[in-house]
Every structure is written in structure tokens, then in C-alpha cells.
Image (cartoon, rainbow, N blue to C red):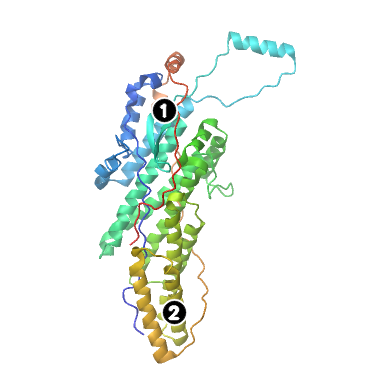
Amino acid sequence: MAPLADVLRPACDGLVPGIKLTKPVNFATEKKLFAAVALPILEAMSAARTKLLCECRDFKKPAQNQWEETKTSFQMETYLQAATDYLSLVKGFTEHHAPPPPTTTTTTDANDEQTSLLASDESCEQPPPSIPFTCCEWLDLTSTTSVHSLNAHHEYAHALLAVGCVCFHRASDLTQVMLQSRDFEYDEPKLKEAYNLLLRVAGLFEALLAWLGIPSSSSSTAAMSDAAMQQWRLEQSNAANPEVQTLQRVKDFEQGTLVRFLHGVGLAQAQELVVLRGVTRENVDYVLMGKLCMDISKRYAELTPTPKFTAWAAWKATYYAGLSAYYHGVFEWNKNEGAACAQAIAQFQAAKDLWAKLDNNHVQRSKAIVQRDLDIATSRNQSIYHELVPDTITPLDRVGLVQSQSFPIVASNALWKETPQPIATVKQGLSNAPAAAPPVHQVETSSGGCACAIL
């Protein structure tokens, strides 16, 4: 029995969530907000923020953004280091200009209370409030409105999400090259870069969930590494931090829905690339490919996407369930036996039935290939084997081979230690700072679709 020609490749086009745009900021000129901060820190922040590659002067013209102008020269390690530099500078504000945690006192004696009040009047002074970051304006991807960072905790979260979105776009561009490639050996470095980038993106979103004080799937204290334990402590601390919890009013961070979704997509797409490379090798383990596809299908089915990506996630789950059945059928066909041929027919039919639910044009090639192989197997069985075709199939067990790469713990930038702030300067600068950001108008949207295409 001749092997099937042109075995189907997976439709592993990457998710393009959109660039989380931000307007350019020159921190050194924002004297009312940052008069208490040393100039070297502000200059370093302005330079580092530009390297996030998501600046756009007009949100109404999103195509005219920094990423589109610079993506051809993108270098992963350089970019992630620049992002870490900016995050470390912002984190300094949370440690050097953060209000203390709330305290409660229980007075059991009137004299003690009077003594406490006198001490407060004479020597105790209120600590400075955290510095607002209202000069930093971001595009909220979920509501498509602009939002301002209320404080450093907000700016850190917005920046981390923006970095993750840029990495998704880069991985998608690299995947497109692989899907169109006729020489996988030549283009394999692009696949490896996309694969590693997606695993790092998954780790990045785990770090963002910890920053939001929201447990991730890996938030378990059992057998934790030192880095994971440190991230877990951050998660516990920020869960009780009122400045962090105000991020729940921003749609992109509400209940961590979008962040959890992107974390899951990063891992699922990394495994899609494993399958893409696996089926293009000279010797293919089709049972393993089928099990990997079943795991991908389950991953997408288990996601809780935002409304914008609901249809896309359902499409992926159905497609990879069908692809799992198809690869199992190829494995049975290659046995060159009567019973296996009948089993292959059942597998191909199951894939065909699943893909019949997908009514867009991007799956037409997949449907054509499975119909071709179904016809070949049916003809062989009717003319030679005359085996009874099973009415049902048993799906393969899922196998996952991907694991997120931890995002490095970000420490406060060394500039904060090299340029300490005088207390008097801090008070003077903050006395002119606005108490809060302008109100943010959030708009619920129910528009469907997404910015990715499945070939």
C-alpha cells in the first residue's frame, strides 16, 4: 500500500491580538508629576519606553505605529532586555514612592490614645502618596478605548501586556514564513525562534497574572523553585494591594480574563509548531502527532476567551480534534492491513465530519485532502479487503510537550540606589501632583472576529 501523498500540515497561523498602543511620553518634561524624581531616572525611562515598540501618536490611526516601522529589524533578546529595563525603572516607584500598607490600632486606654494623638501632632507626618502616571496613555485592547495609568503598578501592567502582544505579532510573522516555506531545513531557525518566543510569552503572562494578584495554573507552592516562590509571594502581596486592585476597572485586566487567555494561547501555539515540524520530517510518528493535536484541541477548548476571540478559539479546538483523527488514520493506513484500512476509513470520516462544522474558506484545502484520502482508503477496502468499517472511533489520549519559560524576576533598577531622593524634594514635588487620574470611560464591545487568518 503506497503512502499517502501530500499529508496535511496543521493550520497553525498565530493569534494576532493587536498592538497595545501607547502615546509617546517624555518623563523629564512632566515636572508636576515627577519633580521628586532624579533626572537620570526620568531620562532613562523615556529612552526605555520608546524601545517597547508600541508608540502611536494617534489611536485613530493605529496602522501608523512604531511596530510596523521597526518589525523587520526585531531582535528578540535585545527587545526583551529593553522591556526588562523599563519595567525595572517603573518598579522603583513601587518601592521608593509607595504608600505603606494600612495599619489598624486598638486603643484600650484613654491615656494611650491621648499620647498617640499628641505624638502624631508633634512628630508623626503622613507618608507621601504614590506618584500618578497619568501622562501615560494606553489603548485598552478589550474596549478599544484609551486609558491612563493611575500609578506605577498600572504602568507596569500595561507595559508588560504590551510586550506580550508585540511578541505574539513577531511569532505570527515567523510562523507565516514557515507555512509558506518549501525548505524547512533552511527556515527552521525561524520556527525555533517562534517556538521559544511563545514559551517565553507564556511565562511573561504568568508574571503578569502574579502582578495582578491573580493565581495562574502554575501557582502551586508544591515543589516550587526559588524564582517561582518569589513570584508566588508577589502574587499574594499584590492581591491585597489596593493600588494594584484598581486595575480591575481596566477591561484588559478585569478578572485576568484576557491575560489568562493569552497565556493559554501561547502554550497551545507553541505545541502547534511542534506538530508543524514533526509532520515535515522524513520519518513521522503519526500517533504522536495525533496525541499532540488532541492536546492542542483540549487546550483551546478549555480556554475562557474574551468575546472577540470566542469564535477563533472554538475553530481551533474543532480543527485540531479533526486533525488528531486524521493523523491517526494515516498511521492505520500505513500498516498495510485490511482491518487497519477499515480503521483508517473511520478516522478519515471522523475528521471530515468535524471539519464539516467549519464553514470558512480557510479550511477548504484540509477538507479536500481528507476527502481524497477517504476516497483512496474506501476504494482499497471495497476492492481488496472488504472489511467492516467501525461506526465509532476512540479518540487518542492527549500528550503535551510544552512548558512556559519563566519570565525573569524584575528588580528595581540600580539608578534608584545611585540617585536617592531627598525627603524634602519628594514632598515638594508631590504637593503639586494630582490626586488621581481623570475618569476613564470604558465601552463594552461585542464585535466578533479576530485579526488572524487560518490557511
Q: Amino acid at mark 1?
A: Phe
Q: In the image shown, does 439 or 334 lie closer to the viewer?
A: 439
Residue shown at 62% from the left, 11% from the top = 119
Q: Is residue 218 above or below residue 140?
A: below
Instruction: Give coordinates of residue 198: x percent, y percent.
Output: 39, 52
CA gap, disc 1 and disc 2: 61 Å
Instruction: Give coordinates of residue 155: x percent, y percent.
Output: 42, 33
**What residue is shown with label 2?**
344
Could one spot residue 405 in this view of the protein? Answer: no
10 Å crowding of disc 1: few (<14), some (14-19), many (20+): many
Residue shown at 50% from the left, 65% from the top = 398
Residue shown at 33% from the left, 42% from the top = 79
Q: In the image shown, does 303 or 280 lie closer to the viewer?
A: 303
**What residue is shown with label 1?**
133
Q: Is residue 353 above or below residue 335?
A: above
What is the number of the mark on residue 212?
none
Residue shown at 55% from the left, 45% from the top = 215
Examine the image and state in which quarter residue 100 appears. Answer: top right
Q: Are marks 1 and 2 in contact (CB under 8 Å)?
A: no
Indicate left or right for 224 with 148 as reference: right
Query: SS at mark 2?
Result: helix
Could one spot residue 386 in this view of the protein? Answer: yes
Q: Is residue 383 above or below residue 43?
A: below
Quarter of the image with the C terminus is: bottom left
Quarter of the image with the N terminus is: bottom left
Instruction: Give coordinates of residue 157: x percent, y percent.
Output: 44, 37
Q: Amino acid at mark 2?
A: Ala
Q: Earlier in the sequence, mark 1 or mark 2?
A: 1
